[in-house]
Image: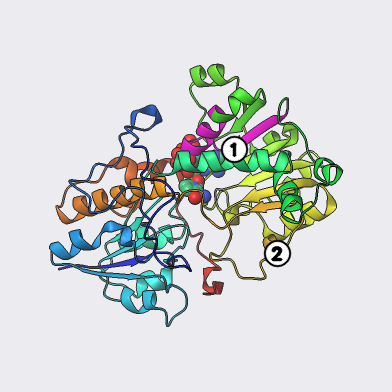
Amino acid sequence: MAKIVCVLYPDPVTGYPSHYARDGVPRIEGYPGGQSVPSPHSIDFTPGHLLGCVSGELGLRTYLEGLGHTLVVTSDKDGAGSTFARELVDADVVISQPFWPAYLTADRIASAPNLKLAVTAGIGSDHVDLQAAIDAGITVAEVTYSNSISVSEHVVMMILSLVRNYIPSHDWVTKGGWNIADCVARSYDLEGMTVGTVAAGRIGLAVLRRLKPFDVNLHYTDKHRLDESVETELGLVFHESASSLVEVCDVVTINAPLHPETEGLFDDRLISKMKRGAYLVNTARGKICDRDAVVRALESGQLAGYAGDVWFPQPAPPDHPWREMPHEGMTPHISGTSLSAQARYAAGTREILECFFEDRPMRDEYLIVNGGRLAGTGAHSYTPGDATSGSQGTMSF
Ligand code: NDP
């Protein structure tokens, strides 16, 4: 029988919800491009309920214990003495979400000789040292597309909130003010601006599609060029490099995975090539931006605003400078874990586990590493290597 260790974010401070703001979530029949939604044999949870926290257990306990397996669920993930580190040593499967990542460093992989499968309940497996997983023959899988649209909606929200100066204006209301001039002195229309995405995969393309009706000029860069028909439909301008893209954009959104090619991409040098007063929105991964370069650019006015929901490490320490920097629109890492998204990636996690325990192949699009090499989506979008270094500095609160 197998041991599954599942690392999830803590329950709400007010306790696990007994009721919800709405009575359900819409059922999505398929994803853009034709990929089908997760299709496990069955599920043991109610879509629309909180599944990504410890008490939600991704709805997996009945299924796994019914097969005689052991399920350990914890949010205590950082440091050598953590529950995760202790339980990992004889685990067969690890499940983790990028919002509250269980960093699977090379050392931790070495401490887990039974480990065969690391599942990302969501998208983005950079919290796993992919090179170490390749070397150890561990399969890494994620629930591709499960929350891509969720993130694209968050990106559009953040672009609009920065450009229109929404958060500071809202703050004046809650402070009892009616300070129109204070609010609008930094407020613009998005219409007519040039918006570019670094990467036009599932999220990046969905962002471009959602922004098209705002009458903006749309640009992108990616490792592979989109079909000509898509470029024509959306009026896209392609750039061979991020450097060429950022020079012409008023707004840049980052939608690439974190891997050795993208780690630290937005440093002082690249940010200095952006137009003065550009906005930068990063919901991809914190490490794609140089933390202190972003702060410097906001303080100098080189950037007019920075928003995103991804930090490094996660959870971000209380003194992380992105909490206090000027003109920021940060949230904790939430864009891909709406209740709607949770229902999809919980079902996708169940599907991956059913394949694993029934010895059936997983969908190719879910695979990042398999058989000692990058596979499936991983072979397309990632490069081998390690993006987990520095995660040892994570604190727990
Ligand atoms: P996709 O795999 O569909 O798209 C990723 C795109 O990035 C691909 O088109 C890929 O190119 C491109 N890419 C990879 N490396 C580079 C590079 N060096 N320069 C330019 N483009 C590059 O993934 P998604 O769109 O679904 O997700 C993207 C990322 O967003 C995830 O990896 C994750 O880090 C993050 N994410 C964040 C979430 C959140 O909650 N904030 C939730 C979900 C995802 P190609 O395939 O053409 O080679």
**Residue depicted at x 63% and y 70%:** 318
Label 1 neighbour load within 10 Å: few <14, some 14-19, many 20+: some
Find the magenta span and give its range.
193-209
> Which secondary structure, mark 1?
helix
The residue at the point 32 percent across, 62 percent down is 57
**260 or 287: nearer the eye?**
287
Label 1 sits on residue: 156
- Measured from the top left, where is residue 257 in percent x and y? 51, 47
The crowd level at tag 2 (other Cα within 10 Å; few <14, some 14-19, many 20+) is: some
Q: How many numbered circles does the render carry? A: 2
Quadrant into which the N terminus falls: bottom left
Q: Is residue 290 visible?
A: yes
Q: Is residue 255 visible?
A: no
Asked whether 206 falls inside the magenta stretch, the response is yes
Mark on residue 356? none
The label number, if any, that marks residue 321 in the structure image: 2
Secondary element under disc 2, as helix, strand or loop, is helix
Q: Is residue 372 above or below residue 75?
A: above
- What amino acid is found at the position of numbered circle 1 in the picture? Val
Question: Does the segment drawn in magenta span residue 246?
Answer: no
Question: Mark 1 or mark 2, which has the lower sequence index?
Answer: 1
Which is more toward the observer, 353 or 256?
A: 353
Q: Residue 297, percent across and down?
A: 78, 52
Res. 175 image quadrant: bottom right
